[in-house]
Amino acid sequence: MNTPATTSVSPAQPTFPLEFGLDTFGDVTNDAEGRPLSHAQTIRNIVEHGVAAEQAGVDFFGIGEHHTDDMPLSASDTVLAAIAARTERIRLGSAVTVLSSDDPVRVFQRYSTLNAISDGRAEVILGRGSSIDSFPLFGFDLADYQDLFEEKTNLFANLLQGGPVTWTGRTRSALTDQDVVPHLETPLPTWIGVGGSPESVIRAARYGFSLMLAVIGGPAARFAPYSQLFHQALEQFGHTAKPIGLHSPGHVAATDEQARDEFWPPYLEVLRRVSKTRGFAVPTEASFLHEIGPGGSLFVGSPETVATKIAANMTTVGANRFDLKYAMGGLSDDALLTNIRLYGTEVVPRVRELLSERSEAVAPAA
Amino acid sequence: MTGITIGRPRVAILGVGHVGSALARVMLDAGYDVHVAASGDPAKIALIASVLMPAAKPGWAADAVADADIVVLAIPLHRFSSLDHSMLDGKIVIDTMNYWAPTDGVQDLFESTPLSSSEVVQTTLAGATVVKTFNHIGYHEMEEERRPAGSPERRALGVASDDPEAAALVGSLVDAIGYDVVALDALRDGIAFEPGGPVFGARLSADEFERAVSVDAAVAEAAA
């Protein structure tokens, strides 16, 4: 009774290369005396995190747009461009771009510019935005968010095809044979971030985008049927198979105990604050222990603990990409840099090892 | 073939988003006959229904509602005013919706009133009998948290209605799914289940749930 009815993944699913990323929402961290750093220093630190992620061998670094005092990363692409100038291999993207309250033409221009600067390393993850600070800021009505996202995704898909665009809609002025620059030299991989809405899964499939499942509560296994829905919908819309990713919050330290001790106080503080504006329940120690356990959505622990959980979840859901959302409130910058290093140098190689053992175990003898 | 309700009542769920699809699955598991509908053509939700809730029957909203004993509103609250209210006349309606302006935007119908959100729904659906439940458990917990009756770790859900019979029918559904029931005998009291309230999103046993709700009521009374 505890497990969802459907947890199997279609065996016919083609394989995409395994990729491992780090995402941040740009939390303002504290200095050694526990005082919050300035927004400017926070942003400079995040540039260093991106560089550190490449050095640790991480495949992707993502920044989630936010517009609040405790998460001042409102211009993700500018920060990503700074990281691009100091790196050579790591892929860089939004996680997510709140497309509903942005202009698809500008999003395209900014990320095709990032793609040019980075020599084709840019990606975009589009979201409706569960964090809704941007709606009043840019003058959009939250009641329209469904229609805004639908229309703007449609226009963005048009822009990605290249060539002059003709488009009409309700949420933005029309375009007629409009050339939108800079042109893409290499493709711009585009994902749709989905928090739990089946309709969003269908939307990603309709446009042939990749699917990024944000698992921020409960077991990842409940998303296994969404993978199946995505595969079937892609087929129905006549698209080839597309990658599936998982995004979940977490924190890696040398030991389980250290990771828990570092993560729990800022996590409680952030959730307590968020619960006031968003109506969430405040976590308890019991609920926290549940979430960091095998059936929860927090990836907190030693490299071995986190790697084991990532491998298990990627297998259950049928994902080829995992993005760990690191950083939480006032966690120190040192702790974040350690997290980044351990993730890249220990967690990711261990997950690759676990997944290849698993596929060897499944594959028939040659 | 209608009217042969042997045992379990027939359920129509309006909305196949995260809440509607999770509810459909747990109700199907509990042996209920479940019909699902979104706004418009059932063909639009056929794939979602076939993959995420294979035994549910997709249809037009009016048809699903017409034959149902219980109708579940699992749509975003801002879509409530555009729903055809008259089709719900005479029905028992489960209100799973929440009004929370910071995430849904300000809506006049729910903002400029001293009533709880479910009382506004009841006032708008004058011909229906509204029961408030399922609004205070996360859709992502709905399946995982189920436990058999008598399990020491069984979680409780509140059921609030002005109509004892409707509350009893919905209570039996909640119990059959896998949750203990704490029944409150006024829809108004369901205000304790709202976001920011003492039981919203909380994993509580029936005793803990009752205590949390009665402490909340006492505080409200003292403040009044």
Image (tube, coloured by chain):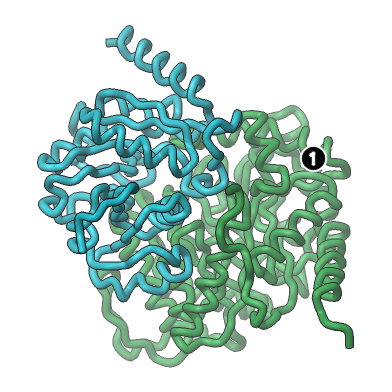
Chain colours: A green, B cyan
What residue sits 63% from the left and 62% below the top? A246
Residue A114 can be seen in this image: yes
Percent across and percent down for residue A355 are 81, 68
Q: Amino acid at mark 1?
A: Ala
Q: Residue A41 sits in which quadrant? A: top right
Q: Nearer the viewer, residue B102 or B52?
A: B52
Q: Nearer the viewer, residue B93 or A30?
A: B93
Residue B79 can be seen in this image: no
Q: Quadrant of the C terminus of chain A?
A: bottom right
What residue sits 31% from the left and 76% below the top? B43
Q: Which residue is mark 1?
A: A259
Q: Is residue A37 left or right of residue A278?
A: right
What residue sits 39% from the left and 30% below the top? B158
Residue lying at the far top in this picture: please name it. B222
Q: Is residue A48 left or right of residue A145?
A: right
In the depicted structure, whether residue A357 falls above or below residue B13: below
> At numbered mark 1, what does the secondary structure look like: helix, strand or loop?
helix
Percent across and percent down for residue B189 are 30, 24
What residue sits 37% from the left and 87% below the top? A165
Q: Residue A8 sits in which quadrant? A: bottom right
In the depicted structure, whether residue B88 falls above or below residue A16: above
Neighbour class for label 1 at 10 Å: few (<14), some, many (≥20)? many
Q: Nearer the viewer, residue B100 or A285?
A: A285
